[in-house]
Amino acid sequence: MPHKVGLGLCALLFLASGGELAAQGITHHLPLPPPALTQPPQGTAYHDPVFGLPIRRLTDSRQSGQSGVVPDYSKRQLWNCDESLLLLRTIGGDTLLYDAKDYHLIKSLDAVGGEDVFWHPTQPLLLYFNTGNSLDLINVQTMQVTRITTFSEYSFANTRGEGNLSQDGRFYALVGQLYDVPTGEMTFKDLLLFDIEQGAVVGRLPLPAPLEDFDWVSISPKGNFIVVDYGGYKTGRYGGLEVYDRSFNFLWQKPVGYGHSDLGLDPNGDEILVIGLYDADTNESILMKYRLADGTQTELLRHSPMVDHHISCRNLLRPGWAFISTYATAERVDQGGASPWLPFEDEIFAVKLDGSRDVLRYAHHRSRRYPPHVEEPDPGLYFAEPHATVSPRGDKIIYGSNWGDTSALDRIDAYLVDLNPAVRQPNGRRDRRPRPR
């Protein structure tokens, strides 16, 4: 049924938020190795000894008998619209609801699952989720579930786990997929644009068959563009990164591979994609920005390819920066400390989206993705990648860390960096935003 996206408390908070990230803290590009530090107990805050910001350990998976508790993914917003609640997940796939003021666990949302989970943009108690080919809405207080729509033509219809709703909550871009049980093969059938307000599919693009690669699809933050990462380095249609308008008219394509990425807003308010690329000529990793309107690219930062990263542009209420969490590659770990510490290694930082190469460096996450000297690293340690996710106002970050212990998945827990000491209004005063009642 149609669902209205009304103006509520969160929209008023959006209008009142404002502010810029101040150029405080560490802004140079030099190596910053982390000193030894004892892991804090759950609920304890400490100050990062290099960067000085307060960090709080939110969970203790081993003590609570859980299989690791982590943020879902860097591209997914953990906080609800007024930042009173937040979501974490267990490595086993459970969705956990936390109070975002004192960080106590409220309950497990047993009904919520699937690859697409989105907070409602204006109603702080409402959460969208898609467990297969249906979009549902749940009230996390009453646990009442409302079916928004079913994409009955498909076995699965979703973003493939990396897309988001438009910022106003109206548009949902997804891919319809058919699963053949006897062969186990998945066919990518159609790209769809669903209008939640109208309760109808308002755009469709049939995909060619066979389509060998498909990574993810998403609507852009303002809802003006549909972005698809098919993956790979193909230069022709239906390969690499393609951008369409809302009617699925093709706009441009780039052969960018499978780099980690996120959609966001730059300082001019333009809708953009930030993605990690590799420059084989210089053997460097590049953080690149593409303007969705025309594909114009802006290089943001270069660093060693021995440092991989995830990208979060979920700070849509305070745009202009991309938040990066890096982690050492398997090759880097196998060096065994023989090489000097690299710039930005195992860090969480922000890079400005204007091409200035300005950075704000916040924390060492102290997580190890790969155990040393193994040819085939345990794939479960994927969850030890920090997957740092920034809050809507850009003043808090949550990431996962095993504190260097690769022995078990229940060593992975969630930590929060409080950036409020670095967030100021343009006049230099602290951002005194309205508190939800």
Image (spheres, rainbow, N blue to C red):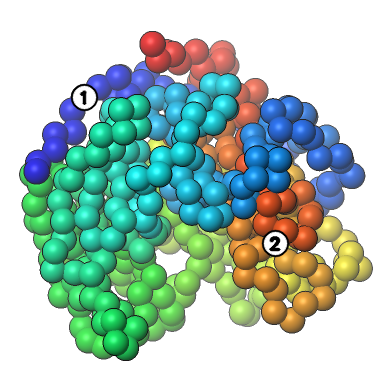
Q: Residue 11: where, in percent of width, then height?
A: 29, 24
* Number of residues whose C-alpha sits closer than 10 Å to that of mark 2, classed few (under 14), some (14–19) or many (20 or more): many
Instruction: Say which element carries label 1.
Output: loop
Q: Is residue 64 visible?
A: yes
Instruction: Say which element carries label 2.
Output: loop
Earlier in the chain: of badge 1 and badge 2, it is 1
**Which residue is denoted by mark 1 in the rendering?**
7
**Which residue is denoted by mark 2 in the rendering?**
369
Q: Mark 1 to mark 2: distance in Å?
A: 42 Å
Q: Is residue 411 above or below residue 80?
A: below
Q: Residue 89: where, in percent of width, then height?
A: 51, 47
Q: Residue 154: where, in percent of width, then height?
A: 19, 69
Q: Residue 58: where, in percent of width, then height?
A: 64, 34
Say which quadrant the N terminus sits in. top left
Front tag of 1 and 2: 2
* Number of residues whose C-alpha sits closer than 10 Å to that of mark 1, classed few (under 14), some (14–19) or many (20 or more): few
